[in-house]
Image (tube, rainbow, N blue to C red):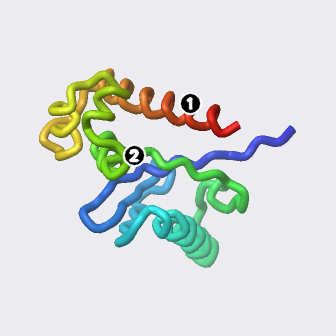
Amino acid sequence: VTYMQTLTINTSKTPSGYSASCDIIPGWVVAYEGDFDGFEPYVRESIDFYVECCQADGTEYPPILAEKDVAIRYRFDVQSLLNHYQNIFSLAALQCITGINQRQLWHYAAGRSKPRPKQAEKIVGALNHLGKELVALSV
């Protein structure tokens, strides 16, 4: 059995799009203006371009980057995650899902404060749990 490798991309929502970086690609940063559907192929194109440049220069790069079937996992910071789902769920709904007061969620989404690691895990865990429930309903 072969397992697909996963590349984690640190992702943030910007006022007009998204930005990304990757821990295993020093100095690589991507900024994109537009929606997330356009961002994903843009990231893949940027990674391909990075690999092409490294190959042309004879520079080493992480082998996972050259894999054609590598899965990309987008890891959002909490502020970006909340902003991403803001048009889908109201803060009242997010309060029901996460158990965190909607006023506090607003502070996180607006960038006025950052959640403690335990709170961040609670938010991510609640959204993951909701996703699993929704997937189970579709079967």
Q: Work out whether 53 lies above or below 15.
A: below
Report the residue marked by disc 2. Answer: 76
CB atoms of marks 1 and 2 within 8 Å:
no
Q: Work out whether 133 lies above or below 69.
A: above
Q: CA distance from mark 1 to mark 2?
A: 21 Å
In front of the other: 61 or 10: 10
Residue 20 in percent (x, y) is at 40, 58
Q: Looking at the image, which residue is at 73% across and 46% down?
A: 4
Characterize the local packing of mark 2: few (<14), some (14-19) or many (20 or more) Cα atoms within 10 angstroms. some
Report the residue marked by disc 1. Answer: 133
Q: Looking at the image, which residue is at 87% across and 38% down?
A: 1
Characterize the local packing of mark 1: few (<14), some (14-19) or many (20 or more) Cα atoms within 10 angstroms. few
Q: Looking at the image, which residue is at 77% across and 41% down?
A: 3
Residue 79 in percent (x, y) is at 27, 44
Q: What SS does tag 2 mark?
A: strand
Horizontally, is 99 left or right of 55 in the view? left
In front of the other: 138 or 27: 138
Q: What SS does tag 1 mark?
A: helix
Q: Amino acid at mark 2?
A: Phe
